Each structure stands twice: as C-alpha cells, then as structure tokens.
Amino acid sequence: MRTRAALIRAAQTMIGDGRLNAPVLEITQAADVGMGSFYNHFESKEDLFQAAVNEALDVHGALLDSLTEGLSDPAEVFAESFRLTGRLHRKAPEISRVLLRSGAALISSDRGLAPRAKRDILAAIEAGRFTVRDPELALVAAAGAVLCLGQLLHDQPERDDGEASDQLAEDLLRMFGIPADEAREICTGPLPTLEG
C-alpha cells in the first residue's frame, strides 16, 4: 500500500505540474520505487493518473462530508462546501492543481465535489430553498465557479481566498433563489477550521 500511495502522490504532483507526458520511469523515480513495482499496482500510466485524480476527489469529498455533517439546511451545506473548497485551493494546492487540471471532466464525475453539490442542490430544491429550474445547469454554474475561482487564486496569490470564496458562494445562493440578506448571513458565518 505504501508503494501504491507513493506512486499516486508522485502522479498527483506530475498532474498538478502539467507533466502528463512524463514517462513511467520518471514517475517511479519521483515515487522512489522500482520500475517493476509500478506494474504490480497499475496497468498503465493512464491507470495511475486516473487513480491519482480519483484519490484527490475522494479525499476532498470525504473532507467536505465530515465538515458539513452537522448542518441540516441544504442551502447552508451547499454554501459551506463551496466556501471550504475555495479555501482548499490555498490550503491544499497540490490537490487543487489536480482538480484544476481535470477541469470540466469533474462535472460528470461520480466522486468528489460534483455528486455532493448535485445532492445538495436537489435537496435544497426539494426543501424549497433553491428555486432553480434545472439542477444540472445549477451544478454547471457551481462547478464552473469553483474551478475558475481556483485558477484565479493560483494566478493571484495576493487575493484573499476566504473573501473571494464567500462572495462567490453568496452570489451563487442569490442566483439559486436565496434572498440577498439571507445569502450574506449564510456566507459570512463561521466555518470549521481547515487543517493544513
């Protein structure tokens, strides 16, 4: 398991750096494992890179679930998840870069943020909190916003990640039908502490 984890970490670094054409030998050297060990765990480099993205999505999703588990309002769950994800672009830059490199493909992923955001959007619609006509388009808006926010935060290291995340989450809530004053209240409330 340590060898597999080392290979995944090396692949995440390569993906984050945009080095998708790195040869298997370079990946195994970065992981400090033998070339033969690679094929004990993965059939191909593409297999490894997919596992690296899946691992990043699973870690991110599990973190969001644990940090929002005490909330009962799906609009608050959605907003808190978005606000935390915005902050994670700075707190966990390697995972952030993996997510950004995966880009639009994440919207149809059954792992990580997309299925959770969709779940929260549907729950908020069912609870009468969101008034969106098309949950899929709401998901597209949220996913595009969180990915572009991540890129902006990487490009502008001086920008306050918390302020930007909160403002964008507030704008999304308003777009989804939450009154402006309530959206502001939800998005200025305290957040759980992120480790890192």
Image (spheres, grey):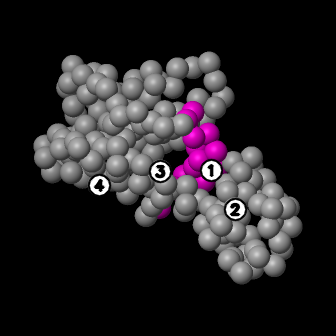
User: Considering the image in quadrants, where does the N terminus appear?
Assistant: bottom right
| Mark 4: secondary structure | helix
Q: Is residue 95 visible?
A: yes
Front residue of this view, candidates 131 and 164? 164
The residues bearing labels 4 and 3 have C-alpha atoms spaced at a distance of 16 Å
Residue 75 lies, with reference to residue 20, above or below; the image says above
Residue 107 part of the magenta segment: yes
Span highlighted in magenta in the image: 89-109
Report the predominant secondary structure element of the magenta stretch.
helix
- Answer with mark 3 or mark 1, whichever residue precedes in sequence: 3
Q: Residues within 10 Å of mark 4 (few under 14, many from 20)?
A: some
Q: Which residue is mark 3?
A: 60
Image location of residue 144, percent across then percent down: 48, 42
- Answer with mark 2 or mark 4, whichever residue precedes in sequence: 2
Please name the residue shown 41% across and 54% down the image. Answer: 62
| Mark 2: secondary structure | helix
The residues bearing labels 3 and 2 have C-alpha atoms spaced at a distance of 18 Å
Q: Are marks 2 and 4 in contact (CB under 8 Å)?
A: no
Q: Which residue is mark 4?
A: 119
